[in-house]
Amino acid sequence: MSYFVVIRDAGPGWTEGKGAFEQPGVADHAAFMNALADEGIVLFAGPLAGSEHGRIRALVIINADSEAAIRDRLAADPWAQTHRLVITSVEPWNIFVGADRLAAAPMA
């Protein structure tokens, strides 16, 4: 397994004029992301720079075997299926500072 940084942005299905918590299907999206966290796949996730109030831009730190595995898992997100969120980048991440703390964190 390796760490990846994933950026997800509001897609064409985003409801304009509404923040993240006002979007249709927010509870289903949250449940999906929490399930990935419980599996130890999503380590950290959240909106950048207060973007949850408008068109969201989210950072997700993922532990996975490959970019293909990440794209496959995130495709099942209800917000991905309705094009509310789209993946704009997936980058492998080499941790230099704090890697020992992350490795010591309990996994689900």
Image: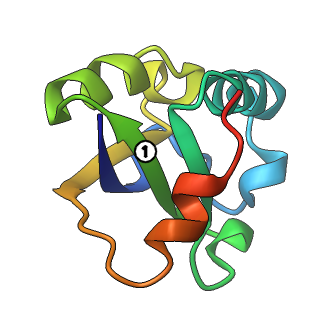
Residue that appears at 40% across and 47% down: 11
Q: Is residue 25 above or below residue 76?
A: below
Where is residue 17 shown, x and y percent of the image? 69, 63
Q: Is residue 59 above or below residue 74?
A: below
Residue that appears at 66% across and 33% down: 37
The quarter holding residue 20 reads bottom right
Where is residue 34 shown, x and y percent of the image? 73, 31
Residue 56 in view, yes or no: no
Element type at mark 1: strand
Q: Amino acid at mark 1?
A: Ile
Q: Is residue 57 above or below residue 76?
A: below
Q: How is the image coloured?
A: rainbow
Q: Please name whichever residue, 57 or 44, is drawn nearer the observer in this view of the structure.
A: 44
Report the side of 64 relative to 33 (left or right).
left
Q: Please name whichever residue, 78 or 74, is drawn nearer the observer in this view of the structure.
A: 74
Q: Please name whichever residue, 48 or 84, is drawn nearer the observer in this view of the structure.
A: 48
Q: Residues within 10 Å of mark 1 (few under 14, many from 20)?
A: many
Image quadrant holding the C terminus, namely top right
Image quadrant holding the N terminus, namely top left
Query: How many discs mark residues in the rendered view?
Result: 1
Residue that appears at 51% across and 68% down: 100
Where is residue 8 shown, x and y percent of the image? 40, 53
Where is residue 92 shown, x and y percent of the image? 19, 56
**Which residue position holds label 1?**
62
Report the side of 69 relative to 108 (left or right).
left
Residue 95 in view, yes or no: yes
